[in-house]
Amino acid sequence: MSAYLSRELLPIMFLLLVYGCAPAAIRSSSGPILDAPAALPANNITGVWQGRSFADCPIVTTTDPGRCGAMQIITLTMFQDGPRVIGSYRCAYGNENCRDLAETGVISNGQMTARLLRIAVMLEDGSMCRFTGMPQNGIMEGRYQCHWGGPMEQGGFRVERSY
């Protein structure tokens, strides 16, 4: 009886061993494989980024001298699909109110190419701000320019990925 079991079970045990060590994609071709979600690629900027924007003085002095050195708390919530980036923008008081009290906006026409992010933010007051930055290790620094017909404000920003 033991010779019979050995002869019959040995091939089955071998197949189970091979089957158990095979990659998940080979094991089943009948349906989707449900694995844990993969981590986002290193250059994917999907997430919530929080930080500050700082207005430059030279251009501000011609349109609104009181905004020279203005700092705001900003949040960029972005979703990346291939090179396309969409999302939302939020501004909160730093050492000055948000420009024209425009606290929210929609990120449109965003694009991530290689390591450079370019987004356009349409603000609730009808103006638009363009942000350009390079994310690296969960930190993004860059420049912005806001305008409504002509240049209104420009400066720098620094945000960190919060999640």
Image: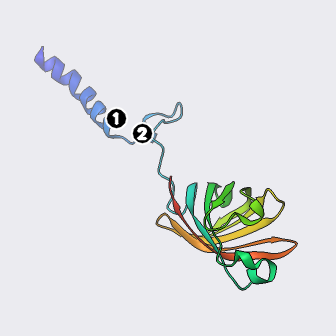
Query: In this orientation, does residue 52 appear?
Result: yes
Q: Quadrant of the N terminus?
A: top left
| x and y percentages locating residue 39 in the rendered image | 47, 51
The one nearer the camera, 160 or 21, is 160
In the rendered structure, which amino acid carries the disc numbered 1? Tyr
Tell me which residue sits at (79%, 56%) in the image. Answer: 124
Across and down, in percent, residue 64 comes to 78, 77
Q: Residue at horizontal 75%, vertical 83%?
A: 61
Q: Residue furthest left?
A: 2
**Label 1 SS:** helix
Point out which mark residue 105 bears.
Answer: none
- Measure how far apart labels 2 and 1 are at the Cα level: 10 Å
Q: Which residue shows up at 23% across the image and 21% down it?
A: 8
Of circles 2 and 1, the one toward us is 2
Residue 34 against residue 92 in the figure, above or below: above
Rendered position, 33 above or below 87? above
- Going from N to C along the chain, the mark reached first, 2 or 1, is 1
**Which image quarter: residue 48?**
bottom right
Instruction: Name the residue at 46% across, 66% down.
Output: 137
Is 139 situated left or right of 155 in this image? Answer: left
Percent position of residue 44, x then y: 56, 59
Q: What is the residue that sits farthest to the top in this orientation?
A: 1
Residue located beneath label 1 in the image: 19
Q: How many marks?
A: 2
What residue sits right under mark 2 in the picture? 24
